[in-house]
Amino acid sequence: MRLISLLLVCTAIQPSQAFIEDILNQAFGGAGGGGGGGFQFQFGGGGFHQPQQPRYKPVKFPKGVTSKIHKSMDWMKGTEWMWNDWEKVRFQSDGIFVAPTEECHQPQAKQCKWSADKDGNINIMWGKKSGLHEVKADHMPDMNDDDFELELPNISLSGKRKRDGAPLHAEFVQVFDTEIQDARRDLYGDLGLEPGADVSTVKKAFRKMSIKYHPDKTGNDPTAHRKFTRIGEANEILSDPAKKFLYDMGGMESVRAMEKGDIPRGEDGHVTYPVPLEKLYTGSKEHVRINRRVVCTGCRQKPDLEKCRGCGKCPDEVKMVQQQVGPGFFVQQQQQVPSRERCKNEDTELELNIEKGMMDGEQIVFEGMAEQRPGQIPGNLIFTIKQTSDQRFMRENGYDLRTATQIPLKEALLGFDRSMAHLDGHQVRLVKQPGEVCQPFEVMKIPGEGMPHKVEGGGHSDYGDLYVKMNVKFPESLTDAQREAIDKLFPAEETQ
């Protein structure tokens, strides 16, 4: 309706053709000054057309100038610099140079590239118009130092433009490519460990190094602060079995893919674990040995390593592949493909923390400790508590206990003060005062002598109650003298 109204007005007053084109372009968001790429209205040519982006041919370095990036200059990859106090430029890891100019702001056009030789000379082809720019760092960081990135802010670039000798300089801004940072990371090295160290060793190293580099000890030392941050990041990943497994298999790239939900998760393993009632009352540390399949990390590349002995073929991997289902139509499907990784069965010892008051059916979960399979996040290993029966005590309502004890007839009649052993061996006092007759099958309640109340996060807050059934032991027979004595003590009661 908006277009029709405009055309009616235009027809009535018959303005110039250029004026109408300008109105239509403003109304419908034409390309204008170079940002939008919308529709451009023109009369006499079919109404409107979509402007074509300029086509460029990939630029080439001049003869004698390398087109590659020497490995000693990898520190430049993924960095951003302030160029000539003007604008920020970027050195991509794929050799593309990005700058806010007509030729260099579209990386896909490959009009601007950079390279570097072993002597530290950095060559930039700034499109065909500006041509070759040559700069060099005032000093080089030590790539063997895990913390070499701390030195980058202290580095400057300087040089000149080849065609006219115009001076150039640049100051470091940041490493913008997190994938580059991830690829450079050695998490085990951050903690001073050899690759493949187990989780307990990782945690021990982290505790030691976190004390050494804690800000309370190091103050404002930027190197120590960076180290403290790095060891925290390393511990976060390597102390998590699932993340550690993926890091060992495919580095930080696999860990990031997991965090994005791009890696499937394997099945959980389930174990029913019998626990006596006594241990559910006292709590216990149980050491359990399991045998499971593990991936031999690093053995595909180096099968002759000592740790790779006994490693054989892994199960097939499940991968997502594109399948054509019709002309021009593709779907993503899961497909099993042979694995190139190596696997073996390995014994692992686990510690089960049986907490006081745990319930029958409660679960203890070991994250990422199910069987391993290449290309998958290991599932959890889940132990389900199976409470076994006790000869003397029975659990009731989760927190109470029931038991029975035998009382001689004499004590049932005259009173008693006796004790009985509990599940953990401590003595529970049972008392009937003189004059209080204990009836057969009477149940005595002992407050606070039941099962512990387990609380979330460990520990317990209270105890249930103990119920003791009194089984009065009657004599199997009486002598004549006993019968006469009882008859005198208990005269015949009148019956109705």
Image (cartoon, grey):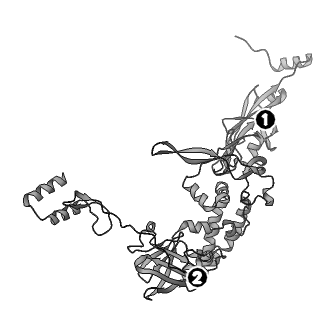
Q: Which mark is residue 390?
A: 1
In this view of the protein, which residue sits in the foreground, 187 or 41? Answer: 41
Q: Which mark is residue 120?
A: 2
In this view of the protein, which residue sits in the foreground, 15 or 278? Answer: 15
Percent of width and height locating residue 411? 82, 30
Percent of width and height locating residue 131? 44, 80
Percent of width and height locating residue 407? 82, 30
Percent of width and height locating residue 170? 48, 82
For the point 43% across and 69% down, the residue is 57
The Cα–Cα distance between marks 1 and 2, rounded to whole angstroms, is 77 Å
Of callouts 1 and 2, the N-terminal one: 2
The residue lying furthest to the front in this view is 63
Within 10 Å of disc 2 (Cα), the crowding (few <14, some 14-19, many 20+) is some
Q: Is residue 450 something that shows in the picture?
A: no
In this view of the protein, which residue sits in the foreground, 248 or 478? Answer: 248
The residue lying furthest to the left in this view is 12
The nearer-to-camera label among 1 and 2 is: 2
The amino acid on which the numbered mark 1 sits, given as a three-letter code, is Asp
